[in-house]
Image (cartoon, grey):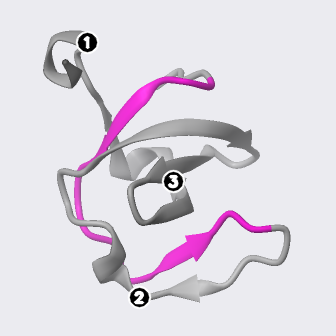
């Protein structure tokens, strides 16, 4: 899947933990982001990982755990 900054993506499945996208990343509990929640890509990282801003924080998420969101679904 090809993504760019500003794209809207949906978390397809719950992760065992979340890694914050801070300069000094920390592991966070998985219940901060629910499966199905929509977030915005704010940075692209190596190894098919993106920083996604959700309502409760910005986290590093592998692309295989994310699904694209149609523009009609966001509005």
Q: Position of residue 27 (x, y in %)?
A: 58, 86
Residue lying at 62% horizontally and 25% vertically, measured from the top left = 5
Q: Earlier in the sequence, mark 1 or mark 2?
A: 2
In front of the other: label 2 or label 3? 2
Q: CA distance from mark 1 to mark 3?
A: 22 Å
Query: What stretch of residues is rendered in magenta?
Result: 5-22
Rendering quarter of residue 70: top left
Determine which residue is flagged by label 2.
29
Determine which residue is flagged by label 3.
62
- In the picture, measured across the screen, residue 25 lies left or right of residue 16, that is right
Q: Earlier in the sequence, mark 1 or mark 3?
A: 3
Is mark 1 in CB contact (under 8 Å) with mark 2? Answer: no
- In the picture, measured across the screen, residue 64 lies left or right of residue 59, that is left
Residue lying at 53% horizontally and 21% vertically, measured from the top left = 2
Q: Is residue 35 above or below residue 43?
A: below
Secondary element at image label 2:
loop
Determine which residue is flagged by label 1.
71
Secondary element at image label 1:
helix
């Amino acid at each position: 899947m090809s993504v760019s900054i500003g794209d809207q993506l949906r978390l397809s499945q719950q992760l065992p933990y979340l890694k914050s996208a801070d300069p000094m990343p920390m592991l966070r509990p998985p219940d901060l982001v629910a499966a199905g929640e929509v977030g915005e890509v704010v940075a692209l990282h190596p190894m098919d990982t993106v920083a996604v801003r959700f309502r409760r924080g910005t986290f590093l998420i592998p692309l295989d755990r994310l699904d694209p969101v149609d523009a009609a679904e966001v509005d």
